[in-house]
Image (cartoon, helix red, strand yellow):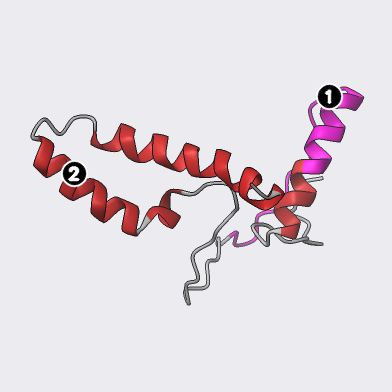
Amino acid sequence: MTSTESELKPQANEVNAVIDKLTKHITNNQDRLDFLDILHQFRHTFDTSTATQAHVTIHHTIPTADARPTSVRPFYKTPQQREVLHKEVEKLLHDNVIRGSTSPWASP
């Protein structure tokens, strides 16, 4: 087994576990097998190992009228918590789940 195969195997097992959990309630064995076949055809849908995002054409805005941004100090975080938070934010930025902002409404 190559290193790539061994890296993918745990993720495949996780997807299989999710699919099995989704079909446990089906008591008729043939119906369950038929449904499992369909779910396995679209197994990529259940893979949460990488971030995915929907691509929509709707532009979302939040009307703020003349309201001014609030100013609140951030909650205290230990250095370890800040490091974990920083890594998670970097991951979300890298995966294009979030983007940087210079808006006065942006969180610190």
Q: Position of residue 9 (x, y in %)?
A: 56, 43
**Residue 43, horizontal then vertical, whole percent:** 39, 53
Q: Are marks 1 and 2 in contact (CB under 8 Å)?
A: no
Q: Residue at x 75, y 53 (%)?
A: 106
Q: Quadrant of the C terminus?
A: top right
Can residue 107 be seen in the rendering of this structure? yes
- Residue 72: x percent and y percent? 78, 36
Badge 2 element? helix
Query: Is residue 20 inside the magenta stretch?
Result: no
Mark 1, secondary structure of its residue:
loop
Q: Which residue is mark 2?
A: 33
User: Which span is picked out in magenta?
Assistant: 64-87
Query: Which residue has dot 1 on it?
Result: 76
Q: Nearer the viewer, residue 99 or 63?
A: 99
Instruction: Give the residue type at disc 1.
Output: Tyr
Residue placed most toward the observer, 97 or 26 = 26
